Amino acid sequence: MPQRLQRPFLSYEDLRRRAGDFLRTHHPAGTIPVPIEEIVEFRYRIDIIPVPGLQEAFEVDGFISSDLKTITVDALVYERRPGRCRFTLAHELAHVVLHRRIFQAHRFRSVEDWKRFQREMDEEDRRWLEWQAYAFAGLVLVPAEPLRTEYQKAVRVAGRAGLSLQKAGEVARSYVADWLARRFEVSAQVIERRLDKDELWPRTGPPEEESGGWRKVR
């Protein structure tokens, strides 16, 4: 039987507050892109270890050890996909910030141990923990105030390119998301999710359940 965890209940607004506290403590300058790698290594003293073939063999971009001292990252992601790597680091660091007790209570150092931990976890618990980590990572890498400021700039840039959000629809939306993704050094999907959550543009579909809203944004 899958083991149940004493997982914390955190709403999106709870996570927004936690992310704000995190940034005020670890990145008070407030510049973008947020220096997540430096925060991981120098603020939290966590080693980042690139491993060739991690994604191909185990279908994960990275994972954190149960002692919270090492983040193992796929070498190709680390070397060639900076936005994806930054989100992976922020996601794994979110487990440190939000789920320290849970991870420390389970011993795993290898990716095989980590995968076993994931398999043995109750599915609902796993989904909630992952959603919290995804959402926290997005809030840290794309903070609310810089997002609002840069969004206004992006709209003006799009307008100069002849693209209006009101008239050009998805084309303008994609242009704005891509422009912001380069500024924050994350994927366009992360930007779109943050713009939706902060209601900087209207939703285009039905609301998603909180426990699954960040499932495919890396």
Image (tube, helix red, strand yellow):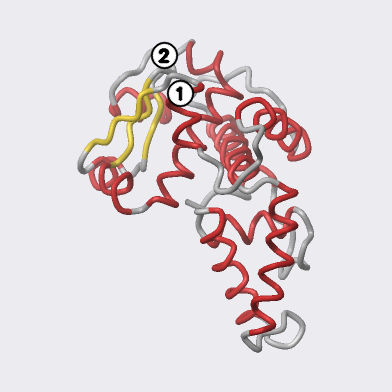
Q: Nearer the viewer, residue 28 or 18?
A: 28
What residue sits 69% from the left and 67% below the top?
153
Decide: is 54 above or below 155: above
User: Compared with residue 95, is residue 191 higher up or lower down, i.e. above or below?
Assistant: below
- Residue at 65% of width from left, 76% of height from top? 157
Spot occupied by residue 9 in the image (x, y as percentages of width and height): 72, 27
> Residue 52, percent across and down?
20, 41
Q: Quadrant of residue 188?
A: bottom right
Mark 1 falls on what kind of element? helix
- Going from N to C along the chain, the mark reached first, 2 or 1, is 1
Displayed quadrant of residue 61: top left
Q: Answer few, some or many: residues within 10 Å of disc 1's Cα (few below 14, many 20 plus, some between 14 and 19).
A: few
Specify the label residue 42 is tagged with.
1
Amino acid type at image mark 2: Asp
**Element at label 2:** loop
Name the residue rendered at 49%, 18% in the picture: 103
Q: Amino acid at mark 1?
A: Phe
Q: Which residue is mark 2?
A: 67
Marking on residue 85: none
Marks 2 and 1: CB-CB under 8 Å? no
Tell me the distance, in whole angstroms, between the alpha carbons under discs 2 and 1. 17 Å
Q: Nearer the viewer, mark 2 or mark 1?
A: 1
**In the image: residue 108, left or right of residue 181:** left
| Residue 108 position in % (x across, y down) | 35, 18
Which percent across, then down, holds residue 12?
Answer: 74, 40
* Mark 2 Cα-neighbour bin, 10 Å: few <14, some 14–19, many ≥20: some
